[in-house]
Amino acid sequence: ETGVTQSPTHLIKTRGQQVTLRCSSQSGHNTVSWYQQALGQGPQFIFQYYREEENGRGNFPPRFSGLQFPNYSSELNVNALELDDSALYLCASSINRNTGELFFGEGSRLTVL
Amino acid sequence: DAKTTQPTSMDCAEGRAANLPCNHSTISGNEYVYWYRQIHSQGPQYIIHGLKNNETNEMASLIITEDRKSSTLILPHATLRDTAVYYCIALLYNQGGKLIFGQGTELSVKP
């Protein structure tokens, strides 16, 4: 148990739709990072939020966006879904933006048909 | 960030030590070595990290060579629950949560 919870755990969307994934950070953590993990691959960094502002972004297009709220919970939004967006989306919180010690949730598995 | 290289898979007998190697020959002086593992269908789990010195915690030991070009993660008494994919990651201090995961090593602990 890491104290990081994600919802929903599974969802199915169709191509072109939009999706919002949610993450509740561990208590006392002010930084959240999002990762995408395709089947059989390692997780890929999408972006990080620190104190409600984006603090670094991986190689993902602008249709991937995020929010972090004052209570440090977070959302990942993906617009105009494509088939290749089918993946496990992982949220991780950390006590500050510099540490590499992340606490991951169990993920949200998105299937795009 | 330095690229890391790990064997694709390894086997280990239950109760024996599991020694997982990682090469990071291009690592810079201010890059840490982090290890994570991912049990099937779960999120990655932090194990340990180090810069120069060997490190030990309740989960594992990390041995880093003097030239820092390679390291070994040691699980002293592997159990079936240690079956997972293990990732070795080189990370600059100020890069924080921007971990770059490779393919990792799939460790199978067998009875």
Image (cartoon, coloured by chain):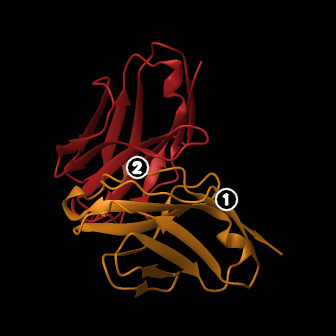
Chain colours: A red, B orange
- Horizontal arrangement in the rendering, residue A88 relative to residue B40 (left or right): left
Residue A39 visible at all: yes
Residue farthest along the top direction in this orientation: A16
**Residue at the disc numbered 1:** B9
Task: Residue B65: give x, y in percent of width and height.
Answer: 41, 79
Name the residue: 49% across, 57% down: B5
In the picture, residue A57 is in which quadrant?
top left
Name the residue: 62% across, 51% down: B41
Residue type for callout 1: Ser
Q: Chain of mark 1?
A: B
Under tag 2, what secondary structure?
Answer: strand
**Residue at the disc numbered 2:** A91
- Horizontal arrangement in the rendering, residue B56 relative to residue B77 (left or right): left
Q: Nearer the viewer, residue B24 or A103?
A: B24
Name the residue: 54% across, 37% down: A38
Relative vertical location of residue A28 with respect to residue A107 in this rendering, above or below: below
Relative vertical location of residue B18 with respect to residue A61 in this rendering, above or below: below
Q: Chain of mark 2?
A: A
Task: Residue A46: give x, y in percent of width and height.
Answer: 34, 40
Task: Residue B92: give x, y in percent of width and height.
Answer: 25, 61
Under tag 1, what secondary structure?
Answer: strand
Residue A1 visible at all: no
Relative vertical location of residue A48 with respect to residue B74 in this rendering, above or below: above
Residue A35 marker? none
Name the residue: 35% across, 73% down: B68
Q: Nearer the viewer, residue B92 or A94?
A: B92
Dividing the image into 4 quarters, which one contains the C terminus of chain A? top right
Q: Nearer the viewer, residue B81 or B73?
A: B73
- Horizontal arrangement in the rendering, residue B34 relative to residue B58 (left or right): left
Q: Nearer the viewer, residue A79 or A24?
A: A79
Relative vertical location of residue B100 with respect to residue A26 in this rendering, above or below: above
Task: Residue B17: give x, y in percent of width and height.
Answer: 66, 83
